[in-house]
Image (spheres, grey):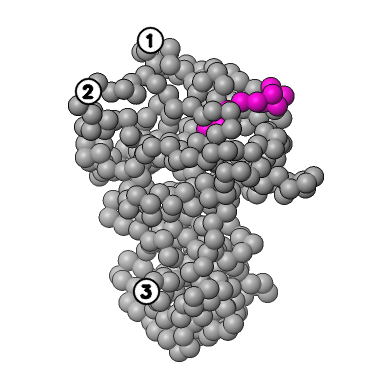
């Protein structure tokens, strides 16, 4: 369990499909269920407690059913929490959410600019692609032998883009180099780790890392002399419209959270899978994710904020959010966890090949784990664990 936890003020999770929700109020805010009065407004929820009133902004199309909030048992281990169930109405507008992810933005015969997510430096100028094509599934090469009656024709051959191609992987984009890359991108060979020094084969297969020359953020890899692999967590892709300057970069953790959440949802919908293994480029599992819900709407605020004269967005789980948004509910296991039950889960996933691989650079994996741990720490104590897994939310 993470050590950085704090008491809950108010926590809410609504489920659009079930049209119901859970409201948890800490006993620092209200001592008994009769101290809590919940009413609804126009796309908002008002919670009145002895500490003051808190207004939660709901997504468009989501409204609270008046007088539907009733107390429910919190369990013996939740003495510092009051639990309530409530009902909501979900209109059609609530299901018309659009994604601005890179994978859904890119289209053939459009012109794009690629920016560094950290400093928003323009990396690739006015790229127009004749073809935007998805790559085969991440583990396609491992099952070729099951389908071919002759030796693998793709062995030791890389899929690389032509000059005006854009190839889409699960977590990366493959594009061809052009003349502007020399000024905006730098290349270096990845260092040899302590474990790799003992294995001469791994030492020979070191990656050629591509970085932003302005801020040194690692963007991806050079997979071939004329091809670049750029991870979607490291770049911002926008349509080239005149001389418009790029918008100010989002907070890094917010950008990472939303990018990964959107991609997990897309992969889950397209592949009908709910298990993901976040891996480093060398194939080592770093984090196991089990997607439970994709229709959640969450809100959370600490006790000190209840009664303050401000509204809290329904997307504000573990940091303020400028807009209301949904969230993915996840179970997760850190693969470096030394607990007996956690090690058994990791072994079971590996032996049974559970979990679609989601490959990200090591530093990005570490950043993602911090974001998920922060989410877990902000949850009420009764919701932080489910059996041997830990629970977290990723905002969309």
**Residue 335 % position (x, y):** 35, 38
Q: Which residue is disc 3 drawn over?
A: 18
Residue at x 51%, y 20% (from the top left corner): 224
In the image, farthest residue toward the top: 200
Q: Which residue is disc 1 drawn over?
A: 200
User: Per the image, is 179 magenta?
Assistant: yes
User: Nearest the camera: 209 or 10?
Assistant: 209
Q: Earlier in the sequence, mark 3 or mark 2?
A: 3
Neighbour tally class for label 1: few under 14, some 14-19, many 20 plus, Cα within 10 Å: few
Segment tinted magenta in the rendering = 174-183
**Residue 2 % position (x, y):** 43, 48
**Quadrant of residue 219 within the rendered picture:** top right
Neighbour tally class for label 2: few under 14, some 14-19, many 20 plus, Cα within 10 Å: few
Q: Earlier in the sequence, mark 1 or mark 3?
A: 3
**Quadrant of residue 112 within the rendered picture:** top right
Q: Which residue is disc 2 drawn over?
A: 150
User: Nearest the camera: 93 or 193?
Assistant: 93
**Residue 62 % position (x, y):** 51, 76
Residue at x 51%, y 80% (from the top left corner): 63
Residue at x 51%, y 67% (from the top left corner): 96
* Residue at mark 1 to residue at mark 3: CA–CA distance: 55 Å
Residue at x 39%, y 84% (from the top left corner): 70
Note whether 256 is above or below 217 in the view shown: below
**Residue 216 % position (x, y):** 65, 28
In the image, farthest residue toward the bottom: 67
User: Per the image, is 136 magenta?
Assistant: no
Secondary element under disc 3, as helix, strand or loop, is loop
| Residue 56 seen in render | no
Answer left or right for 333 relative to 45: left
* Residue at mark 2 to residue at mark 1: CA–CA distance: 31 Å
Secondary element under disc 2, as helix, strand or loop, is loop
């Amino acid at each position: 369990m993470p050590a950085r936890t704090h008491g809950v003020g108010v926590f809410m999770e609504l489920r659009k499909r079930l049209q119901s929700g859970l409201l948890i109020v800490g006993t620092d805010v209200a001592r008994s269920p009769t101290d809590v009065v919940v009413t609804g407004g126009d796309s908002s929820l008002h919670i009145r407690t002895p500490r003051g009133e808190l207004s939660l902004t709901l997504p468009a199309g989501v409204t609270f059913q008046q007088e539907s909030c009733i107390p429910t048992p919190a369990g013996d281990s939740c003495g510092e929490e009051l639990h309530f169930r409530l009902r909501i109405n979900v209109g059609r507008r609530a299901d018309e959410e659009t994604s601005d992810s890179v994978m859904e933005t890119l289209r053939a015969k459009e012109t794009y600019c690629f920016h560094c997510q950290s400093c928003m430096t323009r990396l690739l100028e006015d790229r127009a692609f004749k073809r935007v094509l998805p790559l085969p599934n991440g583990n396609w090469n491992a099952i070729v032998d099951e389908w071919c009656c002759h030796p693998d024709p793709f062995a030791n051959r890389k899929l690389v883009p032509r000059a005006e191609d854009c190839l889409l992987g699960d977590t990366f984009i493959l594009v061809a180099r052009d003349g502007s890359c020399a000024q905006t991108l730098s290349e270096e060979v990845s260092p040899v780790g302590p474990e790799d020094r003992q294995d001469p084969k791994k030492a020979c297969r070191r990656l050629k890392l591509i970085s932003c020359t302005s801020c040194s953020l690692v963007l991806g890899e050079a997979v071939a002399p004329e091809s670049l692999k750029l991870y979607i967590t490291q770049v911002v892709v926008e349509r080239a419209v005149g001389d418009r300057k790029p918008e100010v970069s989002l907070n890094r953790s917010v950008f990472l959270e939303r990018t990964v959440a959107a991609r997990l949802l897309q992969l889950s919908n397209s592949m009908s899978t709910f298990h993901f293994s976040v891996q480093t480029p060398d194939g080592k599992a770093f984090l196991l994710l089990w997607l439970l819900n994709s229709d959640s709407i969450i809100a959370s605020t600490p006790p000190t904020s209840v009664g303050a004269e401000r509204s809290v967005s329904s997307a504000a789980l573990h940091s303020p959010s400028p807009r209301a948004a949904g969230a993915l509910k996840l179970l997760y296991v850190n693969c470096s966890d030394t607990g007996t039950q956690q090690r058994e889960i990791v072994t079971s996933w590996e032996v049974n090949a559970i979990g679609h691989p989601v490959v990200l650079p090591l530093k990005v994996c570490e950043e993602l784990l911090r974001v998920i741990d922060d989410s877990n720490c902000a949850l009420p104590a009764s919701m932080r664990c489910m059996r041997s897994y830990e629970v977290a939310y990723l905002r969309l």
